Image (tube, coloured by chain):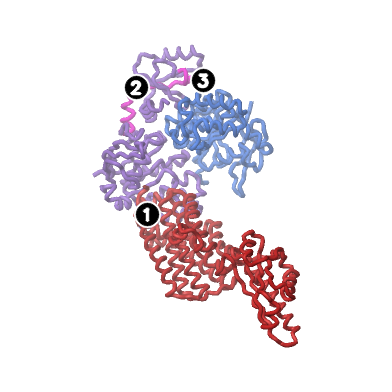
Amino acid sequence: MNVITAENLTKSFGSFTAVDHISFEVAQGEIFGFLGANGAGKTTAIRMLCGLSKPTSGKGYVAGFDIRKQPEQIKANIGYLSQKFALYEDLKVWENIRLYAGIYGIPEKKIGDRIDEILTRLGFENEKEVLVKALPLGWKQKLSFSVAIVHEPRIVFLDEPTSGVDPATRRQFWELIYDAADRGITVFVTTHYMDEAEYCNRVSIMVDGKIQALDTPKNLKKQFEAGNMDEVFHQLARKARLNGD
Amino acid sequence: MNPVTVKNISRKFGKLEALKEISFEANQGEIFGIIGPDGAGKTTLFRILTTLLLADTGEAAVDGFDIVRDYKQIRKRIGYMPGRFSLYQDLTVEENLSVFATVFETTVEKNYDLIKDIYQQIEPFKNRRAGALSGGMKQKLALCCALIHKPSVLFLDEPTTGVDPISRKDLWDMLIRLKKENITILVSTPYMDEAGLCDRIALIQEGRFLKIDTPAELTRKFDKILWAVQSNAMSKLLADLRNHEKVQTCFAFGETHHITMDDSSLTIIELQKYLSRLGHTDIEIRPIVASVEDCFMNLTAKESEK
Amino acid sequence: MKQLKAFIKKEFYHIFRDRLTTAILLLLPIMMLILVGYAITTEVRNTELAIFDPSKDAATLAIINKLESSGYFNVTRYLDSPDEIEHVFREGKTGLAVVFSERFYENLMHTGQAQVQLLADGADPNHAITVTNYATTIIASYQQELLKASVTGVPYQISPEVKLLYNPQMKGAYNFVPGVMGMILMLICAMMTSVSIAREKELGTMELLLVSPMKPIYIILSKVVPYFFLSIINLTTILLLSVYLLKVPIAGSLFWLIILALLFIFVSLALGLLISSMVEKQLVALLISGMALMMPVVFLSGMLFPVENMPWLLRMISEIIPAKWFIMGVRKIMIKGLSYPSITKELLVLGSMAVVLIAVSLKKFKIRLE
């Protein structure tokens, strides 16, 4: 079953076409890597899929809802996390979880259980009462992710969630992503780390607003006769050079 | 005398010991990488060496000048690119460059040769405001601004964070070219593939250098057995491998998981049997040579257990 | 010098590329002056009138009648003694009290002279001036009628004596001009300077400037010079507007007025620098300059409320507020028409404040991050 469908999705700003007729489908429980150079149009595409910006033309369905007409329903069924944390530094760990559980409309009775569940999954039982600002960066990032999916959405969008994070923390973060995908949450992720692209079930590579490649990492490497995803990316993205980043 | 010499530098912020007895030297024309997690003290070290902060104890010299006494001399001779984008967002590319040229009492023309290769990549956008540039172009501009006065030592604090792989490669091509100009470069990065491009790297954790070595030596000295394992269910595989009593560490590495063991008492066949018993198919196990990332993961494994 | 020039140019780019800021900086003084000059002077209708009339004769009744039929006044109280005046004003409803002298008509007829006192609440000087003006005009018209009807040709004269309660010096609308000048200059210089330095810290560009051979004094000057020029432009606008639009003349010496303003600008710039050396964020700079500088300027400089009547502590605090001295000096020059020797004290106080603040802020400027 597909939870994301994009058909010729396009977004123009004046004469500049940021996203140019992209079409793809993402299946339930899939980890979908959305790669591209800075300025290739990834963020614009994600904004459209999250119902934050209207497409100029084309269609898109997320969790069964029309991105054009039902942005509110979409927002209720997705989670979103960018490089910037959405956590409140001056609130305690459990207070942050509680807050977002409330925002996402989890019934009052269930919130307590949900907080315990998340703390256990993260191994943060002892940090429940700690202020978020006292946590190391990697822990914050993990907590942010858990908060972004506190309402068990059908899809979670992650925009460069591991930017600037050290390898050890990045791995722990990816283990959380695996865990979420195992529970049936579809993960739509962008990254600049090409080794992370290999963790994905399928990856698409966007160049100048168009999707130039979309397949499993294994098939892409075969197709481009490359040893790793980094080489695949370079072969494709080099073309974009002359048009700027 | 080496362009950067650091002896027993320590620095506290309140109770937090940001740096503990750091000592090292960087050679002329060398790319010296400082690798470590966030909060390990990289930025504090850079700020001390660029005379922005004072150390509590210890001493250091940059380009032969004492970082406390001769701070004015040092400020003339070094280039610095802070961790976050620090240019004027409301000025154009060209204006930013010329402002920084003036700050360093020089002109864009005088040292244009040095930045030409990288500046040409952003030149088509020279009339665009810096705030409207993409991440990669911003960093290229920042590097140009840091180089405009032909510094003898360059300090780059995570110059490639958030930058796409293409621009990262451009920036690194540039750094390698700068070596030929005999510019010493201190760079920190969270990307392990970039660590491999440094002449020497220091692994930093909780304010302490764990190791200083060349990437080749570092990986050669990796003293554990290292295997790459994959199967049809990678997420489950991670947990199953960690549950095996002879497996010491297990980390996801793209399409495979890397595991280490202390001794060779476990054979590939045995592990294969163990995994198929747990329901894995398409199992592939092969011994591999350690990368810088493997070294980093193992050195920091203890602290990041949590 | 080349460095400094390039940097001042850069600072002007920052100011003018942010259209909103530029508009605020240049239009704010105009808006404030027009507000003060016009919007506050409102049409007065149905002002409640309290009357003390010991005579109760033909003339007083005729005047009361005239006042009431003018549409501007409603007689709501007749007082039994002048002592009640204070009391009715405290109740706050009464806008004007008319106190006739005893045997008003008799005096007028025999001596040709009679007194009437007009008392208004000076706490709102605009209103007070308007109502007393109206009342005076009405009384004058009655006097005209008497003269016309007179066969003897005796020049009857009713002398209305106007008295403002609570604000005996009669600070009218135009007296606000010096206050507005003080406020605008303080705002532009202190607030904008501190915010623009805090912005460099927030963006991290200060870090780059510190790690460069750029002299700290150049960084400071490059921040101060553009706002100095902006203040001069604003000063000119304010003076032109007040002379040509609000018809407030500069009675004294323009030269000394400018010297006084320049001193005040230096003080404000130095305050801005001082604030910026203490804060890291634009928002904090804004709040501090807003709260710590603007509030006292508004409340303690004598611009809105007379400082003389304040408690001892507030009076002491007002002594160290630069705007107070500036406003005092400007009043002397613009309104009272005084010149150099009489503003010596103001010049000296502002001068020494400037020297001390500039010295402190230069010394406090950090050459490192902390």
Q: Residue at x 32, y 53 (%)?
A: B76
Total count of labels: 3
SS state under label 2:
loop
Q: Nearer the viewer, residue C241 or C230?
A: C241
Q: Quadrant of residue B218?
A: top left
Residue visible at 58% across and 31% down in the picture: A101
The lab-note entry on whether marks 1 and 3 share a chain reads: no
Look at chain A in the picture and name its colour.
blue
At mark 3, the secondary structure is loop
* Label 2 to label 3: alpha-carbon separation: 26 Å
Give chain C's shade. red
Circle 2 marks a residue in which chain? B
Q: CA distance from mark 1 to mark 3?
A: 60 Å
Foreground mark, 2 or 1?
1
* Residue B93 in picture, x, y percent from top left: 47, 53
- Mark 2 → mark 1, Cα distance in angstroms: 54 Å
Residue closest to the eye, B130 or B205: B205
Residue position marked by numbered label 2 in the rendering: B224
- Front residue of A81/B228: it is A81
**Amino acid on which disc 2 is placed:** Lys
Residue C192 to residue A238: above or below: below
In percent of width and height, residue B170 lies at 43, 42
Are the two marked residues, 1 and 3, in contact with CB atoms closer than 8 angstroms?
Answer: no
Q: Which mark is residue C365?
A: 1
Q: Which residues are magenta?
A: B213-240
Q: Which residue is mark 3?
A: B233
Instruction: Kindly identify which numbered label has been placed on residue A237.
Output: none
Q: Chain of mark 3?
A: B
Q: Which chain is purple?
A: B
